[in-house]
Image: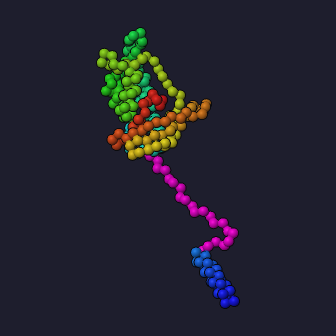
Amino acid sequence: MKLNRKIGFTLATGLMGASLLAAAAGAAPAGSVTAPAQVPAQTVEKVVVTDATKISKLNHTSVTPLIIEAEKRYFYALGGGKGLGDTFEVGGRQYRYLSDDIGTREKLMNYLNSVYTEKAAAYFVDKYFISHDGRLAQLNADGGNILEFDKATAKLLSMTDTQRVYKLSVPYPEHLQGPAYVTVKFEKVGQFWRVGTAPHAIF
């Protein structure tokens, strides 16, 4: 009998202690639902770009301005610069000279290197242009792209301090079909970010 009284006293003391602890902690009554803790929303920094050739911080908000500038310089070079130059034939194929502002390899590379890495620009120049009588020339043909890169959105795929890879979603005019997806590499050259993918592989 003494043993039973001792066990009963111990149980009662334990239950009372648990109740006091729950009250002290502000525990909710049994059966109630506790609201989950609110997690503060993550704010994404918007990079304001005033000069696309001098982007020192790259994220999905500054990728598009850099791509727009890269597209502009690509098509300017592909179009021969300022208007159509004089033409000539080599091996039965017609070529035209580039305008004076980009009329040598050095000038064209300097123009492209404001947005492209040295390697990406050189790959493009060596593929599409020839040197003739000390001037740069290209096949007498025009190219184009209807994709609206100025409306592209970017998703980060991988990153280091000096290299990034983004997947671009680029719409067609008036959304005639689903967007095109283009993967583009970027590299930091000195203080600023440059496109590390050759332009003809993007546009």
Does residue 60 sit above or below 108 in this rendering?
below
Q: Position of residue 71 (x, y in %)?
A: 45, 31
**Which of the 4 image quarters holds residue 11?**
bottom right
Residue 52 appearing in the image: no
Q: Residue furthest left?
A: 134
Q: Main secondary structure of the magenta part?
A: loop
Residue 33 appearing in the image: yes
Which residue appears at 63% of the width and 66% of the height?
A: 34
Asked if the stretch drawn in magenta spans residue 44, the answer is: yes
Q: Position of residue 49 (x, y in %)?
A: 42, 42
Which residue appears at 44% of the width and 44% of the height?
A: 159
**Which of the 4 image quarters holds residue 185?**
top left
Instruction: Find the magenta span and give its range.
Output: 26-48
Which residue appears at 57% of the width and 31% of the height?
A: 173
Does residue 100 sit above or below 46 in this rendering?
above
Q: Give 24 or 176, whichever is nearer the viewer.
A: 24
Left/right placement of residue 61 relative to residue 18 reads left
